[in-house]
Image (tube, rainbow, N blue to C red):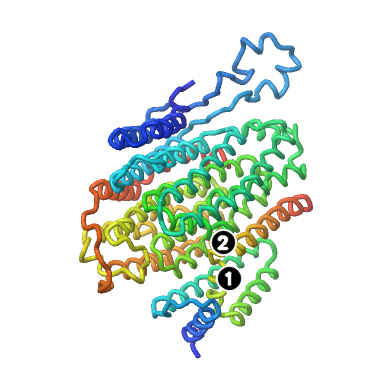
């Protein structure tokens, strides 16, 4: 057993709790939060691959001391391979995904602590709790444990929005909570149905039961469970019909908060999406549903982004649209397609965080996010304008940046799978994404400055600039050397086919 | 009357109904036109995938979509109104989505 595997979840939770105890000790809170946040992306790099059984409860097949004293009708049955405890699985795909999540969490926390005058408070607590929850979603092989962390992640997201102090944030947070009160119990009901049919909450064991005929794959309760889990997945990741509330949630968070929130959505999308494919891939319908929902997310996301006037709302809708690319990769279902989809997930998490932090500098210096009231920022922050422009290029898939590689892979995958229509739509949506970004960029940076616009904070914190440069460097590195990421993701993709 | 003018007229109609007072600018109308074209073209290209089920069905679907697009154009102002932050709209579409997903998974998979 590798103690670093549970530490990826325990450390941010412990830090979050400790930050509360140190309330009002601003300097200590700042140092502790930055040190722990810096450790978050390092742990997955140091941890070795494998399984972690909580409480040391190994399956009987690996626990000869207990298995030796049991009758043969137990050791010769499926019980011999079942996992009696909560199990965390850490493989190469989890390594790169938790690394990227930890890095975005670090940059968001680092930026927020330097942009706010009083670091002490619930904001950092919520950021750490959310990061711990989404890490657990990626690691957990236990669907009930996953649900618990899914709920904690949802509550943390609501908390991050409430703590932002943005106008009308309470209303949006309340709406998201009420919708969550309907959607999340549906996911729990799906988990309960799975438990009822298979007698198990361990995902590997559920798959074993279905593949070995212990449970009928066409059991109607199992099909209902799949539908309910898919519905919970839509809520968690902000796919239609939850795209409106999710983009509103991003727009009511502070830019660093929104950068982290979208990373939560992306990795929740991937975590639950992989589970749906692992358990229900025998239903051809599951992949069709993933493709249809992804197409809807892309079309609705990008078309709605075109009609927004708030910078954060524009990026929020674009982020929803970009989720569709990941879904198409998973829905195409080939190893290459799934690898491309997962690579797109990493790229999207990085680029959207980059855009939120980049446009966040405009909000920081003007206190305005309405594009109709902005303009002339190119004169105020010319170097940052170039960085934000590169972020937009990255999102649209301009070479040699990272999303170019993943989008190209996705288009190739769609052609190889003999569904070129998906490739055409992906190209079309990329063009419109670029247009949407350029429209926002033009109105904020290139249009003449409105006379009533005032610059309230001239100096952008160095932490924000460092975060932007780190994200830009990752975009370039992954664009030039995509294999750094795809080699990690390929193993998982091969296992899902 | 060109598509641009039709869209401009429709935006003003909806704004007068919803009592919005934001100015209709060149950028907002062009954006809506671009969104309109994206929506229609994406849906038509997506409907070509129905060829995997039946080629005749695909042709009928594409023709119906083109017809709807011509008759209902501009769609985006209506879609924008539907996709607003109204809580009742969000709840409606959520329940609708839940119903569709459960129906498709339960009856779709049982009867296929």
Disc 1 versus disc 2: nearer the observer: 2
Cα–Cα span, label 1 and label 2: 13 Å
Residue A352 image position (x, y, % from top left): 40, 53
Q: Residue at x 46, y 29 (%)?
A: A10
Q: Residue at x 34, y 35 (%)?
A: A33
Q: How dense is the environment of label 2, judged by Cα within 10 Å: few (below 14), some, or many (20 and up)?
A: many
**Residue A343 in sight in this render:** no
Which mark is drawn over residue A296? 2
Which mark is drawn over residue A142? none
Q: Is residue A112 left or right of residue A84?
A: left
Is mark 1 in CB contact (under 8 Å) with mark 2? no
Q: Residue at x 58, y 65 (%)?
A: B46
| Figure quadrant of the C terminus of chain A | top right
Residue A421 image position (x, y, % from top left): 55, 63
User: Helix, strand, or loop for circle 2?
Assistant: helix
User: Helix, strand, or loop for circle 1?
Assistant: helix
Residue that extends furthest to the bottom in the rendered view of this protein: B1
Q: Is residue A486 above or below residue A4?
A: below
Image label count:
2
Q: In this view of the protein, which residue sits in the foreground, A402 or A271?
A: A271
Q: Residue at x 63, y 54 (%)?
A: A289
Query: Which chain is mark 2 on?
Result: A
**In which quadrant of the rendered view does residue B49 lie?**
bottom right
Q: Is residue A76 above or below residue B61?
A: above
Residue that extends furthest to the right in the rendered view of this protein: B111
**Residue where numbered disc 1 is placed:** B44
Q: How dense is the environment of label 1, judged by Cα within 10 Å: few (below 14), some, or many (20 and up)?
A: many
Q: In this view of the protein, which residue sits in the foreground, B68 or B82?
A: B82
Residue A122 image position (x, y, % from top left): 41, 41
């Amino acid at each position: 057993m590798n103690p670093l595997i549970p530490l990826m979840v325990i450390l941010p939770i412990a830090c979050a709790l400790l930050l509360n105890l140190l309330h009002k000790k601003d300097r200590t809170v700042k140092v502790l939060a930055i040190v722990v946040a810096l450790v978050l992306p390092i742990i997955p790099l140091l941890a070795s691959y494998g399984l972690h059984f909580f409480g040391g409860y190994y399956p009987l097949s690996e626990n000869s001391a207990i298995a030796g004293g049991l009758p043969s009708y137990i050791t010769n049955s499926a019980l011999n391979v079942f996992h009696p405890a909560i199990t965390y699985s850490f493989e190469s795909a989890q390594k790169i995904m938790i690394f990227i999540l930890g890095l975005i969490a670090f940059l968001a926390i680092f930026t927020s602590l330097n942009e706010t005058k009083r670091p002490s408070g619930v904001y950092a607590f919520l950021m750490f709790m959310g990061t711990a929850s989404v890490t657990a979603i990626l690691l957990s092989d236990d669907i009930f444990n996953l649900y618990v962390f899914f709920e904690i992640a949802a509550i943390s997201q609501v908390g991050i929005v409430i703590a932002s102090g943005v106008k009308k944030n309470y209303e949006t947070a309340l709406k998201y909570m009420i919708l969550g009160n309907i959607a999340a119990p549906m996911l729990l009901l799906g988990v309960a149905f799975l438990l009822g049919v298979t007698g198990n909450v361990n995902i590997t064991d559920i798959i074993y039961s279905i593949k070995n005929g212990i449970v009928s794959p066409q059991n109607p309760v199992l099909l209902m469970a799949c539908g309910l889990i898919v519905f919970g997945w839509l809520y968690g990741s902000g796919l239609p019909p939850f795209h409106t509330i999710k983009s509103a949630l991003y727009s009511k968070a502070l830019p660093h908060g929104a950068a982290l929130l979208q990373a939560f959505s992306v990795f929740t999308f991937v975590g639950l999406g992989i589970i749906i494919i692992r358990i229900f891939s025998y239903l051809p319908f599951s992949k069709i549903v993933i493709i249809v929902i992804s197409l809807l997310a892309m079309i609705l996301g990008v078309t709605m982004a075109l009609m927004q006037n708030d910078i954060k709302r524009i990026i929020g809708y674009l982020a929803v649209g970009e989720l569709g690319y990941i879904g198409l990769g998973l829905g195409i279902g080939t190893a290459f397609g799934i690898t491309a989809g997962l690579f797109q997930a990493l790229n999207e998490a990085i680029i959207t965080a980059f855009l939120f932090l980049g446009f966040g500098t405009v909000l920081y210096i003007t206190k305005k996010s309405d594009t109709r009231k902005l303009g002339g920022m190119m004169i105020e922050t010319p170097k940052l304008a170039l960085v934000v422009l590169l972020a937009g290029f990255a999102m649209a898939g301009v070479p040699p940046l990272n999303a170019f590689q993943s989008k190209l892979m996705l288009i190739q995958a769609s052609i190889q799978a003999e569904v070129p229509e998906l490739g055409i739509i992906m190209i079309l949506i990329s063009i419109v994404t670029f247009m949407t970004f350029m429209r926002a960029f033009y109105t904020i940076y290139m249009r003449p400055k409105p006379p009533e616009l005032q610059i309230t904070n001239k100096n952008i914190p160095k932490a924000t600039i460092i975060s932007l440069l780190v994200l830009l460097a990752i975009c370039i590195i992954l664009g030039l050397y995509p294999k750094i990421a795809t080699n990690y993701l390929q193993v998982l993709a091969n296992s899902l086919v | 009357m060109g598509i641009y003018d039709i869209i401009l007229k429709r935006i003003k109609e909806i704004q007068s109904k919803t009592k919005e007072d934001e100015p209709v600018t060149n950028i907002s109308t062009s954006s809506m036109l671009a969104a309109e074209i994206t929506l229609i073209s994406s849906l038509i290209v997506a409907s070509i995938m129905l060829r995997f089920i039946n080629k005749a069905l695909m042709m009928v679907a594409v023709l119906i979509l083109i017809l709807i697009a011509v008759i209902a154009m501009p769609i985006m102002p209506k879609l924008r109104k539907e996709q607003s932050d109204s809580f009742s709209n969000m709840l409606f579409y959520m329940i609708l989505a839940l119903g569709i997903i459960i129906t498709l998974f339960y009856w779709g998979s049982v009867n296929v």
